[in-house]
Image (cartoon, helix red, strand yellow):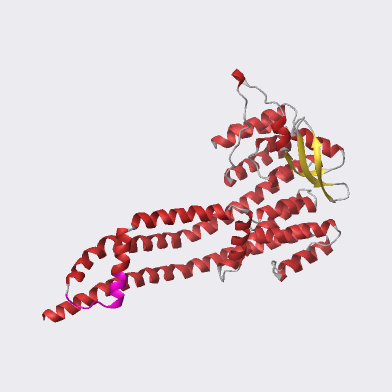
Amino acid sequence: MPTYEYKGLNAKGKAIRGVVDAESARMARGKLRGDGIFPTEITENKSSATDAPPKAGKRGVSKKPMVIRSIPSLELALATRQLATLIGAAVPLVESLTALTEQIEHARLKGIMSRVRDRVNEGANFADALEEARAFPNLYVSLIRAGEASGALEQVLARLAEYLESQVRLKNKVGSIMIYPAVMLGVAVGVVGILVTFVLPQITSLLESMDIELPIYTRIIIGISNVARDWWMLILTVGIAAVFAFRAYIRTERGKRQLDKTVLRLPIFGKLIRLISISRFTSTLSTLLAGGVPIVAALGIAKRVSNNEVIADAISEAQDAITEGASLARPLKASGHFPPTVIHMIDVGERSGELESMLEKISETFDEQIETSVSRLSALMEPLLILLMVGIVMVIILATLVPLTQLTSGLG
């Protein structure tokens, strides 16, 4: 029988971990809940799975589990909003999922929801069916599970739809504002590349044939042009290899943490990225608490959404402190990564019993600050990129024009 390693909370809210025997992950979760344990993470023990005999499918070929890519946030938000409307109209869950499947236009999501509907129709819980699909984030599955347990599935779905929609709006705002600077940077690199590799070599052949002393900056520009023309294949290969090596490094735990630490120290971008991470964390935590998820389990899910290892480590320390009876505000303040305003509002929310609404206000305030900061940064980058491109072009022109002027003066 397969074994599953689990992490969860006991009836007193204390974090525990262990191993449980069960036929499937769904049965393991049910067995743990029967023992009074709220599981937050369940993974199959690979050694037991290896020792177990393979199950033969058709023609004796073993079936491998299907790995499905994540669903686009916008498509998931639309589907969640539609499902919340159907559940709110007192339509049974299976019929709601059937109607939702017929309305979805996204091909992959349509197939996933069809399989989820079939599992629910077979008697599985909605959250278990979503978890088996392996295409939905932990936040989504945990909130659905809490909504089913509390009988407030409609409210949880509506809250989930609002959260997903707000995340899509934030992503679109940041992306749309950064498009113009990115295009300008690409144009600048393209213009300089054409000048150095195609235009400049035709002029340098004339300059090198002159019997005059070329200025130092002209010789430097000619040298750069020659290197770019003769070694462009090697430069391109090294550049691509460096990109892949960097991506491989930041995918490791050490590399990701080092990158996040460095990014947070940047003069302008560091503050913006910190705001985005805290906004995602507070918004997610507020949504989870509103859905009835215990705060320790909610912190375990919300720290992954911050998308920054340094912030996630601070949240993990707060999670451990809460299991020992401490407040949320104190360990977050001790980490030094959260602004005083955030700490104060969380402290007030804990003392007044309105932590959920305070977290939502923090997220809304930070979203406005993010939009303002990105707009100002974009407005600042536009003239800087233009000046940079004009400056590089002027240096190249002057480096070739001055010797030509000297030659013309000598002929005169």
Tell me the quarter of the image containing the N terminus: top right
Q: Quadrant of residue 259?
A: bottom right
User: In which quadrant of the rendered image does the C terminus lie?
Assistant: bottom left
Q: Nearer the viewer, residue 264 or 155?
A: 264
Residue drawn at 69 percent across, 45 percent down: 138
Q: From this view, report whether residue 12 is shown above or below residue 106.
A: below
Q: Residue at x 68, y 30 (%)?
A: 95
Residue 111 falls in which quadrant of the image?
top right
Q: Reply yes or no: does residue 214 show up in magenta.
A: yes
**Is 55 rendered above or below residue 90?**
above
- In the image, residue 140 lies in the stretch drawn in magenta: no
The answer to whether residue 36 is left or right of residue 272 is: right
Image spot of residue 343 (x, y percent): 75, 67
Q: As displayed, is residue 321 above or below residue 98?
A: below
Q: Residue at x 21, y 63 (%)?
A: 202
Whether residue 104 is visible, yes or no, is no
Which of these two is toward me, 313 or 138? 313
Query: Which residues lie in the magenta part?
Result: 211-221
Q: Position of residue 295 (x, y in %)?
A: 79, 53
